[in-house]
Amino acid sequence: MEYFAFITGLLYLILEIRQNSIMWVVGGISAIAYIIVFAENSLFAAMGLQVYYAAVSLYGFYRWRKDKRLARRREEETGDETRNGDEIVYRHIGVRDLLLSMLLFAAVFASLLTFLRNMTGDPMPLADALATALSIVATWWLSRSYICQWLVWVCVDILSAWLFFSQELYLTSVLYLIYTVCAIYGFYHWRKSGVLIKK
């Protein structure tokens, strides 16, 4: 199952960098596979995060399609229809969403850490809770096309690679190291090739 999750995880990342909305479908399938992998290894926060990924995939798919339609409409208004709305679109996060995200992160991290330390046999509760809380925020930002989500993913991916390596999930650890490199590339690719949208 880890091999299948690894392959779908790589495909998910390629589609994410290209901002292809099918990414959310692949991400949902990958999440289901990883729910099984992490449950078998008692990484309960990571497992719960995959449930969240599967759920947010529906919203992300809808939101990205809406953003593409917005870009296409803007092209029609400006008379520039050379790309047919296929370009990468992104936003900068506003102060309100940033503050709400920080509150969400703090609440999720504190709750998860308490739960994992007291109610489970999680071998690495601090790292598991931190990676999970950051991932929840980053996935929400991804669904909203905030470009800064890539920077959060770099932190999450490095931490996750170490976490999974320590649990002898070597293939998954390699996947997260690849994610780290791709997140750095994704940030620069979106910034270079993408179009900033205000709405």
Image (cartoon, helix red, strand yellow):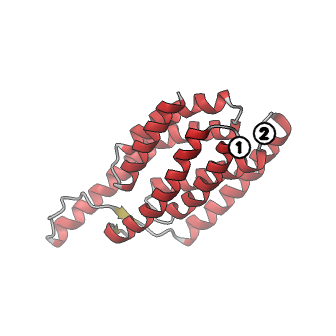
Residue placed furthest toward the right: 118
Asked if the residue at tag 2 contacts the one at tag 1, i.e. Cβ–Cβ closer than 8 Å, the answer is yes
Q: Position of residue 112 (x, y in %)?
A: 75, 45
What residue does disc 2 label?
123
Say if 43 sits above or below 95 in the image: above
Residue 70's label in the rendered image is none
Along the viewing direction, whichever of 113 and 128 lies nearer the viewer: 128
Give the residue drawn at x 65%, y 48%: 132
* Mark 2 surroundings: few (<14), some (14-19) or many (≥20) residues within 10 A: some
Say if 28 sits above or below 61 in the image: above
Mark found first going from the N terminus, 1 or 2: 2
Q: Secondary structure at mark 2?
A: loop
In the rendered structure, which amino acid carries the disc numbered 2? Answer: Pro
> Would residue 199 be seen by someone viewing this image from the given angle?
no
Give the residue drawn at x 71%, y 32%: 42
Answer with the quarter of the image where residue 191 lies: bottom left
Along the viewing direction, whichever of 163 and 56 lies nearer the viewer: 163
Drawn side of residue 134 relative to residue 65, left or right: right
Say if 123 sits above or below 185 in the image: above
Q: Position of residue 110 (x, y in %)?
A: 77, 52
Residue 166's label in the rendered image is 1
Q: How many marks overall? A: 2
Q: Position of residue 106 (x, y in %)?
A: 72, 57
Give the residue drawn at x 57%, y 68%: 96
Answer with the quarter of the image where residue 189 lies: bottom left
> Would residue 92 be seen by someone viewing this image from the given angle?
yes
In the rendered structure, which amino acid carries the disc numbered 1? Answer: Ser
Q: Nearer the viewer, mark 1 or mark 2?
A: 1
In three-dimensional space, the C-alpha distance between marks 1 and 2, rounded to whole angstroms, equals 10 Å
Image quarter in which the C terminus is found: bottom left
Drawn side of residue 32 relative to residue 162, left or right: left
